[in-house]
Amino acid sequence: MSVASVLLLALAVMTAMYALVLAGLVRGLRALKRVTQHLPDVWPSVSVIVPARNEADVLERTLYSLLDQDYPGTWEIVVVDDRSTDNTAAILRELESRHPRLRHVTVEQPNPPSPKKHALAVGIGRSVGEIIVTTDADCTYEIGWLRGMISHMAPDIGVVAGLTVFDLPSNHVPAWQKIQWFDFLVQQLVAAGAAGVGVPSSCNGSNLAYRRVAFDEISGFGESAAVVSGDDVLFAQRVSKQSTWRVTFACAPETVVRSLPVATVREMFDQRMRWASKGLAYRPSMLAFLFGIYAYYLLWIASAAAVILQPGLLPILLGLGAWKLAVDYATVRVGCATFGQTKLLRYFVPFILLHTLFTPVFGLFGLLVPYRWKGEWYRTPVLPRSVRRGLARVRRAYRQRRVAQKAA
């Protein structure tokens, strides 16, 4: 068999496995629609934690949106000023003087290893609610958002994740930003489907609620506290693994949060690499799945390159591509319908092409290349010892081969 034939055979096998995974996600998304919201006799007290670093331009909009919530229980807003150098502190002092529900605290540590986790920990430590809700300083909310999130907190639920969508300023934005909008949505549809089948894989800290007892039970952010990203997904995975609490995903319309997208392509690259940088901290099963997806997408790229040299196999490649496209579209359509976001389906085709190409790039670069966030540079945590040893063996073998070649 030719190299191209072997690659296509492997691609067919992996596409079948991929289709089975997506079928499970569809089952999970449909299961979420059947979840009955829990309306408690006595609503628990809630603390909304908002970390803010140099967010003066958007902070007032976010806080006024939060203050409009119709939550029937006792609740508070704790904003954590994370070493801001703009007008954030002055805005917080002025709003705090007029709204007793709002308090703010200030981060004192100069350079914490994971600024957002540290800011959240500071805010949680200064809050009193039975339920902790985290969000970002550039978001807006439906009036029933808080009530809707807490109504998903059944007695056995420890974590409730919610959907966050980008709020584009107008229809007249660059095409790349619309595709970014859709990409962000699809990531969360996958997370929702996984949660629906009891395998929490991801969530977003801009729309997340969890019980304080669950947070305390697993020692907060624990061993992942030094990982720059992952205040959301790594925490939810640890709750699922280290406690008896379940993790679910809210799909009621009022639980959707709107956030602002990044403004430049460079910021988008940095954002994606920051998200990918926490990959090595995932639980082993999730890490294996993640690298399986990277391998699958790289196999598509390699197969397309090989078929160029053997054009007779092009119909097989196109057939496999049509199969994957149909499975992807069916899954995304169910997800968009679940959350009332079907208008985004118009961006499906450019998204899926770019997604296949760039997912392994961002995933691998995020583990190896420094990225910029909030004006500071970060890079992935130190690679696991086994990985470092493997890379050292590869480098040593390469040097020995070069020496042997020169000697010959």
Image (cartoon, helix red, strand yellow):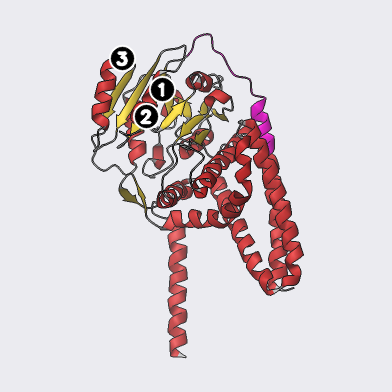
Q: Which residue in the structure is indicated by mark 3?
A: 100
> Is residue 133 within the magenta segment?
no
**Is residue 384 at all visible to an observer of this figure?**
no
Boundaries of the magenta span:
26-43
**Is residue 51 at all visible to an observer of this figure?**
yes
Q: Which residue is depicted at the point 63% across and 68% down? A: 305
Which label sits on residue 50?
A: 2
Amino acid type at circle 2 is Val
Q: Which residue is depicted at the point 47% across and 91% down? A: 408
Question: Which of the pair 163/337 is nearer the observer?
Answer: 337
Q: Earlier in the sequence, mark 3 or mark 2?
A: 2
Residue 308 lies, with reference to residue 242, above or below; the image says: below
Side of 321 where 66 appears, left or right: left
Q: Which residue in the structure is indicated by mark 1?
A: 66
Distance from the alpha carbon under mark 3 to that under mark 2: 16 Å
> Is residue 37 within the magenta segment?
yes
Please state the horizontal and vertical placement of residue 203, each as a whole percent of the image.
51, 36
Q: Quadrant of residue 224?
A: top left
Verify CB contact (< 8 Å) between mark 2 and mark 1.
yes
Helix, strand or loop at label 3? It is loop
Can you name the residue that lies furthest to the front here? 172
Residue 24 lies, with reference to residue 390, above or below; the image says: above
Q: Earlier in the sequence, mark 2 or mark 1?
A: 2
Residue 373 lies, with reference to residue 218, above or below; the image says: below
